[in-house]
Every structure is written in structure tokens, then in C-alpha cells.
Amino acid sequence: MTPASPPFTSPYSLRVKICGTTSLHDALLSAGAGADAVGLIFASISRRRVAAEVAREISLAVGPAVGRVGVFMDQGLDEVLRTAEASRLSAVQIHGEVSSLYLSTLACYYPVLRVLRPAELAGQSTSPGGDQTPTIQPRGLADHTLMLDAPNPGSGQPLDWESLRASFPAGAWLAGGLGPENVARAIQVLRPGGVDAVSGLENSPGVKNPGRVRDFVREARKAALLAFPESYPQ
């Protein structure tokens, strides 16, 4: 089988994803605000973990025009595929240590967002013991799309975008501490293929702030108009 298509379609060069969605109410809020996708977290360690039954309800309600991205961490291939099918996902987002075979196999079934940390962009990461260990190279990977996230996802701490300007892969997505106040600057510096926000759009873990969701989508679209003018009608 050939790899699946990109994570989801959009009329814009920049995709906007609202992650950590835990309720139908918040999913419809994000869709109504103009987001391209919602993120549904299945990682066991997350405070925003959602049941497959709830995710399925969300997927059916928002319809095919809105991407439904399942977020997984250190979970087996069978579990990811079963959950994705039960939840009616349109794409998957993978955190943690996985093999290239894992990713290529998964990409035969779903578009894949592969999450990296800043240290991994240089081709190496630091283990808890301080050793430098090889990791995957970010460029030239045809079977998945890269996403750069903070070392501690969900912490609300933004990355140092200026320091990443030279190493940020073209077309990669950006997460980590994004909100309405800073997403425009992040887009201006790195020109990512997509932006993804969680904690910066919440009243509490798993509960979205409607105003901040709408402001985030609006600010991202405004910044994209300047960063990618060729993708907008004249």
C-alpha cells in the first residue's frame, strides 16, 4: 500500500488545529471558529485524554470538512489503528520513541503527524542519563509530516523560534506554547505548514475558552495572509 495523503486538506497554506478537545461542545466551537482540525488525545498520561466513544461522537458531528487528529504516545501499532477506526479519525499524531517501520506502516492507513523536540532537529537527543543518542532526521520524509513541539507538551512554554529559524524544516507544523498573543510572530518567523494549540486556549485542562479559540484562529489566518499571500485569493 502507498502512504496516505497529507493530514487534511485546507484552502489555505497554513492549517490550524485545536488540540486537547474533550467534548462535543468544544469540537463544534473550534469548527465554528474556522479551525481546520481538532485534536483528540488518547495518550494515557494526558489530563485531556478522551474515550473512543466520545471521539467518535465528535468525529460524526463535525463531519469530513474538519480533520480529526488522534494523539498517541508510546502506544502499539494495533492499539493506534483500532482506536483510530473506532473513533473515525482522519489522521494520527505520534509522540514518543517509534521506529521508521512503525511510521511507514501507520502511514499506509492514515496521514501521520510525527512530533519532534527541538534537540531532535539536529539529529540527536539527550537521554535522561545525559548520553547523546541518534534520532531520525527531519528532512526528506515522504510518509509523514513533521511537527515541532516543546520538550514538555502542554506546558504552555513557547519555543525560541528565532533560534530554530535555520533548522526548521519546510512545511513542518509548530506547537508548544502558542496562543492568540504570539501565534502571528511564530508564523512570521518560521512559516510553518500548520499551528497547533492546547493549554493557551483553555479555562482549565480539557475545557476551551471560546474567546481565545476564536482569537487564535483569527490571528493565525491574519498572519498567514502576510506569510503566504500566494495562497489567498486576490
Image: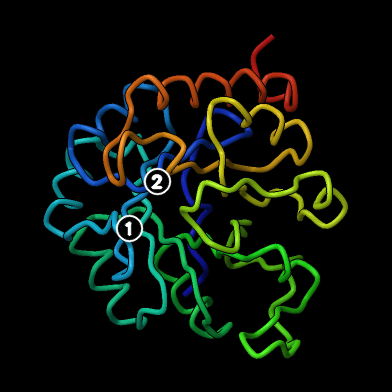
Image point 51% across, 19% down: which residue? 218
Q: How many marks?
A: 2
State the residue position of label 2.
19
Mark 1 residue crowding within 10 angstroms, few (<14) / some (14–19) / many (20+): many
Of the two numbered discs 2 and 1 on the same chain, state the one appearing first in sequence.
Answer: 2
Left or right: where 115 falls relative to 227: left
State the residue position of label 1.
41
Q: Farthest right residue?
A: 166
Q: CA distance from mark 2 to mark 1?
A: 8 Å
The C terminus: image quadrant: top right
The quadrant where residue 231 appears: top right
Contact? badges 2 and 1 (CB < 8 Å): yes
* Residue type at tag 2: Cys
Front position in the image: 98 or 128: 128
Image point 47% across, 79% down: which residue? 105
| Residue 116 image offset from top left, x and y in percent | 62, 65
Q: Is residue 89 above or below residue 132?
A: above
